[in-house]
Every structure is written in C-alpha cells, then in structure tokens.
Image (cartoon, rainbow, N blue to C red):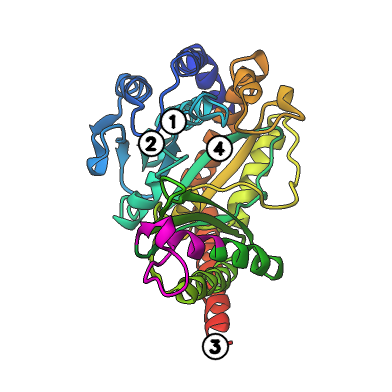
Amino acid sequence: MKEKIQATVEGFLPELWAMTQEMYENPELGLAEVHASKLLRDWLTRQGFAVEENFHGLPTAFRAVYGSGKPVLGFLCEYDALPEIGHGCGHDLIGVISAGAAAALKETVDAHGGTLVVYGTPDEEITCTKVQLTDEGAFDELDVALMLHPYQKTCGRMGSIGIYPVQYEFFGKKCHANEAGPGSDCINALDAAVTAYLNISQAKQYLDANIYGIINNGGTLPNIIPDYASLRYYIRCDEERKTRRAVERVTRCAQGAADSVGAELKITQYLCPTQTLLLNEPLLQAFEENMTALGEPVVVEEGNRLSTDAGNVSFRVPTLHGMIGIHSCQGLDLHTEAFAAQTVTESGREATRLGVCGLAGVGYDLLTKPELLAAVRADFDRGIREQNEKVQWYEVK
C-alpha cells in the first residue's frame, strides 16, 4: 500500500512543486499570507477536503477535513516568510509537504476509516499562532499532529528550545537635563533600564539559559531626562523548569534596578511564549523507519538550537516535528537568503517528494496499526507526567 501512496505522490508532485515555487517567488509576511493560504486551500478543495477559512478568527488560517471517525490525524502547515529574506526558513515547503501527505492518505482513510485534518497555521516566526490555536483548543480533536521542517539534513530527535519573550518597562519622572542632579525629584528611567541590562548580563552567566535583549526605548533627546525606557528579552531554555528559574532571576535584576532609582516597573509578555518540543519515541521511530525505507539517511542532531510554536502543540497532543534535509544546504544557516534559494532547487524538490512520502508513511502506520497509536499515546502521557514532576521538583526546591 505504501508503494501506491508513493505513486499517488508522484502523480501530484508537479502541482505541489508549482505551489512551492509560487510561494518562493511571492513571499508574504506573517498574518499577510493571503496568496499562500489560498493556494493551499484551493488545492485541498480540489482534492476533496472540506475547507474552513478564517479559522479561529485568523484571516490566513484554515482547517481542511477529509473522512470521519477515529483516529484523527492533523497535518500542520506553515507558509509565512521573513522580512527581506523571503523563505529563508523553508516555509514554502512545509505547507506543501503537510497538504500533500494528507491528500496521499485519502484512499487509506476510505479503506480503514479515520479523519485527516490539515491546519493552516500562519505567522510561525513572530506571533506564533499555534500557541493561540493550542490555547483555544483547536488541536484537541487530534490523536496525533504531524509536520516536517526543511533543514540541512534529515533528523527527528533534534528537539527544540522554548522562548519566553518578556518586556521590562521603567517609568520615571521627566525633567530638563540641567535640572537633574542632587535634590532633584527627577527619576531617570533610562538609568534603571541600563542598570537592569548590566545586571542581567552578569546574572545570565550563572543560568542554564540563552538570554539576550535590547533597549528598545531609551528616550528622545539627550537634554531631556527620559521618564520612560524599556528592555525586550528572549529567554531560551530547553526545559520548563530552567525557564522559570531564568525568568525569576532576570525579573529580580529588573526590579532591583527600578528600585535603585525609584522607578516603577511593568512586566509584560510582548509575544506568546513557546514551549520546547515534547519528543515522542514511537513517532520518532516510525518517522525514521519510513525515511530509511525511502533511502533517506536519518541522523541525530545534537543540541537544541531551534524554536517552534509546534512545541506548544506537543504538550497538548502527541506531535512529530521532524526535519527533512535539503542536501544542497549543507553549511548554510536557516534564516538566510542562501537557504531560501535552495528550497526551489532540484534538491529542494527531492526534499519535498521525500517529505510527502515519509510523512504519509507515518500517517499510514498510525491509521492501520492500533498498537502504534496506543504506544504513541502512552509515551505522550509518560512525557507529560515527567515534565510535571520536574516542574514540581523545582517549585519545591
């Protein structure tokens, strides 16, 4: 049956490839992916999927359904580009691979039952809409969520790091610079921000976290003592307990700086925080077996350097977020124009073919092997339990 699925993929691969090229040539920023979203919606409609637009109030999001009953498999699409770079993260392949894999499984669903759901999830890069969709229960209908992301090599066990975006705003009292000094009631908000920045730079040496920030507002003129200044930080960690510890320490640095000059401090999350990927061993094994059967080598990538809003999905339902290799990208970093250019080469086309076939192969196994689905769920429950225990241990400590 998998040979038949692969033949189906070969049949519509030219259509998928045409969509990839169209997205590459017309990159759209997050929440403005009007053309890319329509390309995928229209193609899925032609494949017999029932398509819902404006999903959860997001104009470029969608939900496309084929079949009915259990199990319910979700395929996550991304299609947003980067400013000035275009598709330097390969999102012109992600949506096409997910849509193609779902469409390739229609006959399997017709024969064995089950439901295929393709989600259009815009703006992974900035607003991370999968976080909103997860929080609003959009993926609760799923037994498993599946997607592949372009990379230099094919791997499944790479994991990810979570991102906690935080903004520290300092409120002081404005005055002319000549009036500042001893005896003045002026409060320099920028002094508080700079002190906080320096304190955090020292503290992060003792934290198991990647912490970097900017002063995004520090006043307007040098002869006006600013009554407002602000810092924005990304705090990146590979475990929730490490994130909590880092956020607490950084916040104490900011509060101490505000107190030292008499400023008020306001703390906000200016973007949605993303979680680490909760890896699922049975899903990873299924992915590796299917890719190996296609002749694609699967490697283990050490270190978690990347972030994705699919991490939040993985804490709600079992999730596979594998990496599909564009082999001409060896030595090229993501988020570069050079990487973007490789997505529409022959190597990018082969990655698309292998990605669709491999992801469809995992879907076929889930639809036809109840024991695999049960193992996936058991591993997910174990992973959630262990994560909760780690967080509880930290809170006790």
> Distance between the Cα atoms at labels 1 and 3?
41 Å
Circle 3: residue type: Val
Q: Which residues are magenta?
A: 174-194
Q: Toward which corner of the image does residue 276 lie, by quadrant? A: bottom right
- Disc 2, SS: loop
Q: Is residue 316 visible?
A: no
Q: In the shown orientation, is residue 151 left or right of residue 108?
A: right
| Residue designated by label 4 | 148
Residue 122 marker: 2
- Disc 3, SS: helix
Circle 1: residue type: Asp
Residue 396 marker: 3
| Quadrant showing the C terminus | bottom right
Q: In the shown orientation, is residue 271 left or right of residue 17?
A: left
Task: Answer with mark 1 or mark 3, whichever residue precedes in sequence.
Answer: 1
The answer to whether the residue labelled 3 contacts the one labelled 4, judged by CB atoms less than 8 Å apart, is no
Task: Answer with mark 1 or mark 2, whichever residue precedes in sequence.
Answer: 1
